[in-house]
Image: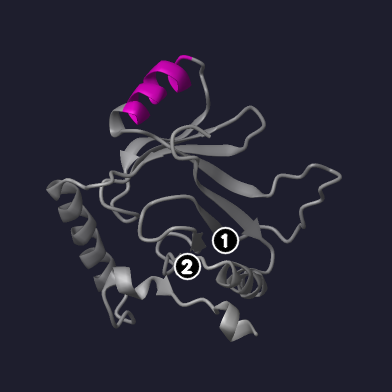
Amino acid sequence: MRWRGVNHVEFSVINYDESIKFYDKMFGWLGYASLWTLDVGHRSTYYLARPPVPHSFIGIQPSASDQPVDHRARSTGIHHVALWARSQREVDQFYREFLLKEEVAITDAPAGYPQYAPGYYAVFFLDPSGIRWELAYIPRVPMPWDLYKFFKTARQLRKQHPEWKRRYTVEMMRRLPSRKDLA
């Protein structure tokens, strides 16, 4: 699990709304925070262990099929697993020195993803069984250029979503029930 552990894990679920109700209660009781993608590019809800510090989080998204995971059949049920990288340079080195050298199937070459976080940079690839992995870097202190790209992307997204009443970063945060709410 290296350096900071697992970055994030995303699970595909059959009944998204019912699953979110369950996870809201479970992660709310545990004291997690939550955010969601606002259906920008894809639909996911995330549960964060230590906000606002980037750390491990778990994502839930709708499945493209209605087939339940059968643990006896060892069916695949996870969307992807993301591991922390120490730097953008490490992502690029991993891509060149391991993924390309070993002829690993690449789903997305190293690139920046300013819609996720300032300075977010990642590569996506498949293991031999087809399980998708990501090596992701998020700087602890983003550079001014990274902040510029993040806020520029947020402005572009806001134009596409007139239903948003607040800033992108505020709109995506969700309140979870606490232990007291569930008592």
Please tell me whether residue 84 is drawn above or below residue 94 in the rendered image.
below
**Could you give the CA–CA distance between mark 2 and mark 1, rounded to whole angstroms?**
14 Å
Please tell me whether residue 143 is drawn above or below residue 163 in the rendered image.
above
Which residues, given as a range, are shown in magenta? 90-101
Q: Is residue 98 magenta?
A: yes
SS for dot 2: strand
State which tag comes first along the sequence, 2 or 1: 2
Side of 58 relative to 153 (left or right): right
So how many labels did they put on this image? 2
SS for dot 1: strand
Name the residue: 54% across, 57% down. Answer: 59
Name the residue: 44% across, 34% down. Answer: 3
Q: Residue placed farthest to the left in the image? A: 144
Q: Main secondary structure of the magenta part?
A: helix
Mark 1, residues whose alpha carbon is within 10 Å: few (<14), some, or many (≥20)? Answer: many
The residue that label 1 is drawn on is 61
The residue that label 2 is drawn on is 34
Q: Is residue 100 magenta?
A: yes
Mark 2, residues whose alpha carbon is within 10 Å: few (<14), some, or many (≥20)? Answer: many
